[in-house]
């Protein structure tokens, strides 16, 4: 590999005594191979150009999650990201994680992130729902989400966390799923009920950003969807979001398309709908009120057949694989 010149455009941040943060951009020139990591370049800058540059690092092996930061518009692990793959016209832009308080330069306050994790009670609890006998194949779901290294990449790029700091976030919800799916957990229903409430899994907008940026391929959104499935199966469907999802399910099964005219009433109720009468009148003036007579799509009978087949043979949301016994 040949050495190339790159410009690192780094966001420098300084927290003042009053809590405000001053930000500015500073450029550094480095000569690195394109397969060198961003972390190596930052170390080069700190060691030979500006020793005050602040960032976190530890394992250098994409295991600890310490070096997560915004690199060229996405949150990534600096130790895993190759310069050549993120440089744009020879420029690499580096900034701290979003949705979390900045302490200095790329160092953030991870306290809020871990408070969300603690809020889901991240340990097994005794209770009546714990299974007494557990086979080896029961841990497929648990093992998948335990790959999470708590780096915060998903939380940094989460569009819901950006507008609602109270949202538990993808990492915390993925960890919550780890306990809900663990056969040794004794309070699965209690967990699902709590997670069904405000700022829980129904707040996720399914933007898939957490799936895109997760360096360990945990797919937090998949865990969130499975939490929703389990909650509905347990009967925790009294929230607006749950009723909204069930209305979708009913309409698609019946007509193959969404009945938007009645969707709001079925989601927020009559009182909630009346409270939005002003917005409804505005839409009416603009000719954007949907028809009360939904369109039935062609071939809806085939769609119903699929629903009926799934009702006769429901998908096991535990998705336990067949036990493999070594010879």
Image (tube, rainbow, N blue to C red):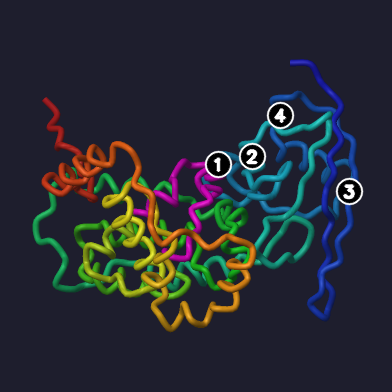
CA gap between label 2 and label 3 equals 20 Å
Determine the residue positioned at 41% across, 56% down: 174
Label 1 crowd bin: few (<14), some (14–19), many (20+), radius 10 Å: some
Determine the residue positioned at 36% across, 70% down: 266
Please state which of residues 56 and 127 is positioned toward the viewer in this rendering. Answer: 127
Label 3 crowd bin: few (<14), some (14–19), many (20+), radius 10 Å: few
CA gap between label 1 and label 4 equals 14 Å
Mark 4, residue position: 36
Determine the residue positioned at 44% across, 73% down: 119
Mark 2, residue position: 79
Residue 142 in the image: x percent, y percent? 30, 51
Q: Earlier in the sequence, mark 1 or mark 4?
A: 4
Q: Earlier in the sequence, mark 1 or mark 3?
A: 3
Q: Earlier in the sequence, mark 4 or mark 2?
A: 4
Mark 1, residue position: 62
Residues tagged 1 and 2 counted as in contact (Cβ below 8 A): yes
Q: Which region shows up in magenta?
A: 201-225
The quarter holding residue 9 reads top right
């Amino acid at each position: 590999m040949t050495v190339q010149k790159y410009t690192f455009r780094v966001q420098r941040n300084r927290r003042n005594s009053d809590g405000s943060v001053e930000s500015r951009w500073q450029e550094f020139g480095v000569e690195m191979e394109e397969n060198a990591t961003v972390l190596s370049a930052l170390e080069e800058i700190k060691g030979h150009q500006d020793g005050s540059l602040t960032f976190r690092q530890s394992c250098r092996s994409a295991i600890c999650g310490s070096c997560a930061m915004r690199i060229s518009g996405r949150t990534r692990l600096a130790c895993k990201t190759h310069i050549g793959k993120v440089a744009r016209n020879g420029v690499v832009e580096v900034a701290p994680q979003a949705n979390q308080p900045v302490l200095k330069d790329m160092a953030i306050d991870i306290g809020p992130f871990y408070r969300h994790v603690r809020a889901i009670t991240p340990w097994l609890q005794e209770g009546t729902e714990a299974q007494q006998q557990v086979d080896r194949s029961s841990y497929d779901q648990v093992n998948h989400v335990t790959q999470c290294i708590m780096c915060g990449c998903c939380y940094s790029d989460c569009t819901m966390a950006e507008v609602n700091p109270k949202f538990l976030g993808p990492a915390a919800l993925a960890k919550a799923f780890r306990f809900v799916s663990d056969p040794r957990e004794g309070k699965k229903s209690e967990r699902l009920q709590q997670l069904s409430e405000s700022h829980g899994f129904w707040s996720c907008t399914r933007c898939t950003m957490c799936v895109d940026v997760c360096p360990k391929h945990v797919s937090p959104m998949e865990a969130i969807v499975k939490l929703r499935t389990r909650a509905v199966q347990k009967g925790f469907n009294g929230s607006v979001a749950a009723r909204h999802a069930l209305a979708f399910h009913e309409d698609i099964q019946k007509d193959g398309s969404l009945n938007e005219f009645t969707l709001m009433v079925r989601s927020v109720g009559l009182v909630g709908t009346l409270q939005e009468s002003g917005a409804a009148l505005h839409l009416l003036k603009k000719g954007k009120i949907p028809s009360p007579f939904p369109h039935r799509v062609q071939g809806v009978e085939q769609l119903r057949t699929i629903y009926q087949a799934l009702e006769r043979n429901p998908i096991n949301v535990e998705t336990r694989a067949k036990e493999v016994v070594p010879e």
